[in-house]
Image (tube, rainbow, N blue to C red):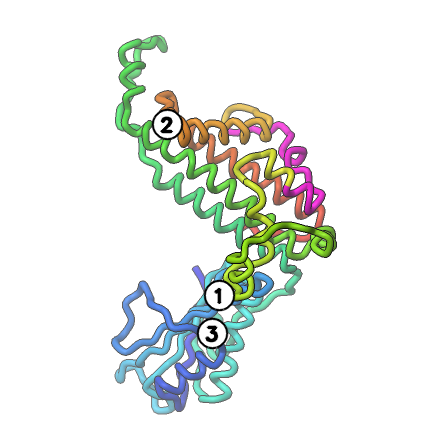
């Protein structure tokens, strides 16, 4: 679901519309949908201060002769973004339409009616809330995608009367090839955890007052290649600072957040949570998952007892750890992180 609006200009060629979009900073791109021959596809995304969540797509397409009206040209401009788009994304969508209509005339048709623009709301977001929203949504989407793609067990365990178990059947289940796949996905679950906390750290130290003050006195050895990347804007100061820590290690992760942001992540996660049918101390559970990953990666240990439900349990623990941290940040910085 999203916002779909089209301007049918009175007077505009394909070149006029494409030059207009490029003047606004839109970049040419490809498109998954099948559009009429000759269509040009564009995309706009604002990284500065994390203003974009979804961005704006724009398509310059030929209007079929049978669908044209007397006051309409041969080319039209379609703009779109999804409902999770930020305020800035929607404001840009409207700005594209307003500017094009002033320049080329015409009629707007779309989700909001004739000659009506997308509805805007009061924007209370900040660079921190927008940055963390972007990271949060990306990771949660990946967790949901893995759950959806996770294969079912290949072997079924026959039910026996009276709840009895069959030793041979129990052993056979451990040979289920799907369990190898579940083991192989444990490092991916830890990577989600690592990615979120690394990216969240970089967002926070870019705007947190304590972190910004520390920069003026912080001393660190920096490789010349990093300085070149910094000068060419291929990397940021926050990225270079984050590289000094390992975010798949709870001690290192906690040190990074305490050193720069005065946030004790272990303390944030040191609470009991219901994960599936059992209750765990979240901090301890995450530590166990990380150790589990180390066993697979460094010692190639395959745990044949790992079931599909147990792997989903791991994903739920990672998701819950992220939720707890996000809630803590919302209170600490008095802001709202969107959860769609």
Magenta stretch in the rendered image: 256-275
Give residue 184's quadrant in the image: top left
Q: Position of residue 281 (x, y in %)?
A: 60, 26
Residue at the spot of label 1: 55
Q: For the residue carrying disc 1, how many other residues have a C-alpha within 10 Å: few (<14), some (14-19), or many (20+)? A: many
Residue at the spot of label 2: 300
Q: Are marks 1 and 2 in contact (CB under 8 Å)?
A: no
Residue at the spot of label 3: 113
Going by the image, does 76 lie left or right of 256?
left
Q: Earlier in the sequence, mark 3 or mark 1?
A: 1
When the figure is inspected, residue 299 is found, relative to residue 193, above or below; the finding is above
Q: Position of residue 299 (x, y in %)?
A: 40, 26
Q: Secondary structure at mark 1?
A: loop
In this view, the residue in front, 313 or 340, is 313
The answer to whether residue 334 of the structure is visible from this angle is: no
Whether residue 67 is in magenta: the answer is no
In this view, the residue in front, 73 or 329, is 329
């Amino acid at each position: 679901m999203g916002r779909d609006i089209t301007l049918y200009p009175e007077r505009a060629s394909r070149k006029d519309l494409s030059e207009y979009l490029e003047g606004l900073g839109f970049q040419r791109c490809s498109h998954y949908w099948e559009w009429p021959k000759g269509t040009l596809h564009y995309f706009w995304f604002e990284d500065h201060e994390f203003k974009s969540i979804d961005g704006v797509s724009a398509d310059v397409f030929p209007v079929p002769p049978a669908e044209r009206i007397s006051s309409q040209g041969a080319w039209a401009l379609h703009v779109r973004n999804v409902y999770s788009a930020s305020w800035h994304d929607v404001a840009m969508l409207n700005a594209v339409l307003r500017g094009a209509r002033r320049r080329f005339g015409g009629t707007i048709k779309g989700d909001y009616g004739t000659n009506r623009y997308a509805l805007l709301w009061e924007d209370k977001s900040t660079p921190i809330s927008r940055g963390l929203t972007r990271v949060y949504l990306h990771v949660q989407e990946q967790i949901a995608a893995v759950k959806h793609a996770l294969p079912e067990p290949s072997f079924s365990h026959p039910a026996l009367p009276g709840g009895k178990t069959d030793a041979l059947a129990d052993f056979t289940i451990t040979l289920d090839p799907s369990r190898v796949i579940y083991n192989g996905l444990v490092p991916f679950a830890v990577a989600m955890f690592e990615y979120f906390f690394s990216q969240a750290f970089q967002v926070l130290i870019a705007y947190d007052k304590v972190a910004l003050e520390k920069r003026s006195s912080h001393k660190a050895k920096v490789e010349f290649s990093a300085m070149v990347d910094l000068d060419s804007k291929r990397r940021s100061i926050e990225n270079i600072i984050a590289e000094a820590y390992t975010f798949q290690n709870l001690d290192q992760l906690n040190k990074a957040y305490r050193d720069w942001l005065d946030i004790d992540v272990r303390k944030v996660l040191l609470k009991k949570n219901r994960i599936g049918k059992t209750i765990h101390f979240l901090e301890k559970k995450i530590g166990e998952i990380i150790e589990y990953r180390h066993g697979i990666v460094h010692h190639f240990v395959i745990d044949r007892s790992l079931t599909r439900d147990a792997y989903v349990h791991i994903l739920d623990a990672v998701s819950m750890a992220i939720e707890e941290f996000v809630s803590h940040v919302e209170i600490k910085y008095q802001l709202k992180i969107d959860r769609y």
